[in-house]
Image: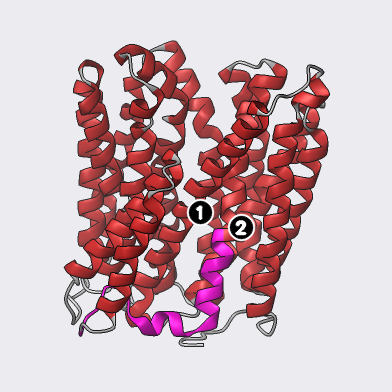
Amino acid sequence: MADSTALHPAFQRRIVPLMAFTVFFSVLNGTMFNVAVPDIQQQFGLSPTQVSWVVTGFIVVFALAAVTYGKLADIYPLRRLITIGLLLFNAGALLGLVFAATSYPVVVAARLIQAAGGGAIPALSLLVATRFFGPQLRGRMLGTLASTVAFAAGIGPLVGGLIAGRWHWRYLFLLSLATLAALWVFRRVLPRESRRAGSFDLGGGLLLAAAVALVLVMITEGWLVLLPLGLVPLGWFWYHVRRTPYPFAPPALFAGPLFRNGLLTVFLAVGPVFGMFFAVPLMLRDLYGLSTLHIGLVIFPGAVSAAFFGLLGGRLADRRGSVFVVQTGLALLLASFVALALAAGAVTLLVSLVLIVCYTGFAFIQSALAKAISTTLAPPHAGVGMGLYNLVFFTAGAFGAALAGRFIEVMMDLGVPAPVADQALPYAGVFVLAALTILLAGWVFQRAYRHQGGPDRDRFGS
C-alpha cells in the first residue's frame, strides 16, 4: 500500500509532470532513431537485415525490461528501480554519443543498454499511477502519460530528421541525457518503501524472455520458423509458474476475464495504430515525394492534438468511467482508419486532419485501457500485471508495424498499375485491415466490460 505522503495531493502534483517529462524522452528516444536507420546503414555499409537490429534489438529488450521491472516492483521499492533504470538508460546514451560513430556493434550495444534501462520508465510510470493514485484520480494521471506518449511518438520522426539531417545521427543520443536531471528529483520525491515479501522467479523470467524474444524477432524479421520455437518456452513457462511458490506471473492473474480480455483488447487496438505509424510516412514518401522534414510536419498536428485530448480522455475516464472512454477512442480510431483508406492519394492537408482524429483516439484508449486493466488487479499483483500490459502493448506495436510492412510489400510485388490512385491501393489496404481489427477489438472489449459502466471502482480479482 502507498503511504499517506505518497497519497497527498502535493506529492501527486509533483510526480505527474516528473513522470511525463521522463516518459517523453523515453518514447522520443525510440521513435526518433527510426528515421536515422538509413544513415546508419549507409555509414557502416550494412544490409537491411543487419541494420534492422538497431530497431529490432531495442524493441525486444525494451519489452522484456518493462515486464521485468513491473515484476520487481512487486518486491522492491520503486525509488530504487527507477534509479537503476535511468542510470542504465543514460549509460547507453553516453556510450552511443561518444563511441557509436566508430563502430556498428557499439551502436547496437548502446541501444540495448538504453532499452534495458528505458523499459523501466513506462512500466514504473503506470505503476506510480496504480499505487499512488486512487481510482477516482487515476485516469487523470494516465491521461497525462497517454498524451505524452502520443505527442512524443508523433514528434519523434520530426526531431530525428532535423538532428540527423543537420548534424549527425549520433547526436540523437544527446537528448536522452536530459533524463539525468529527473534522477535527482525522483530520489527526493518518491517515498522510501520497504521491501515486500517474495522472491524474483528468475527461471520463469528467463522462460518468458525466451518466448517473447523469439516471437518478437519472428515478427520484426519475418522468420515464421521461430513461431513454433517460441511456443516451447511459453508452454514451459506456464507449467513452471503453476508449480513455484513465488511465480513470475501468478496463474490467478489470468483467471479473471476482465484482465485477460483487457490484454487482448490492448493487442488488437494498439497493433493497427503502430501499423499506421509505419505506413503513413511511407505513403507520404511514395505517393507525395515528401522529405523527412515535410513528413514530420504533416504528422505534427496530430501529435499536438494528442497532447491535449489525452488529458481530456484521462479526465473523462475519472468522470464517466474508462469503459466509455475506451469505446469513444475505438470509435475515433475506426473512423480515422476508414477515412485514411479513402484519403490515400488525396491532398496532404486531408491526411493531416484525419491523423488528428487518429492520434486522439490513440490517446483515449491508452489512458482508459490502462486504467480499466489496473482496477482489475489486486495490490500484490499490480506490478507484474501492469508489466504484462506493457509487454502486450509493445509486442502489439511490433506485430502491427511488421504486418503493415509485409502487406505493403506483397501488394507491390503483385504489381501495382501506374496511375497514382492505384499506387495508393497497398496503403488503403493497410488502413482497411486496421479498421477491421479495431472492430474486433471493440467486440472483445464490449463482451468483457459491458457491465462496467459508470465511474470505475476497484474490481480486484473480478
Q: Quadrant of residue 79?
A: bottom left
What amino acid is labelled 1 in the image? Answer: Ala
Secondary structure under badge 1?
helix
State the image coordinates of residue 288 (x, y, percent, origin top left): 71, 18
Residue 405 in sight: yes
Numbered disc total = 2
Give the quadrant of the N terminus.
Answer: bottom left
Quick check: 92 above or below 235? above
Is 355 one of the magenta-colored residues? no
Residue 372: in sight, yes or no? no
Determine the main secondary structure of the stretch shown in magenta.
Answer: helix
Counting from the top left corner in percent of width and height, residue 169 is at: 37, 19
The circle drawn on residue 396 is 1
Kind of element beneath mark 2:
helix
Q: Can you identify the residue that label 2 sits on?
A: 269
> In which image quadrant can residue 299 be found?
top right
The magenta region covers 245-267
Q: 410 or 154, which is in the foreground?
A: 410
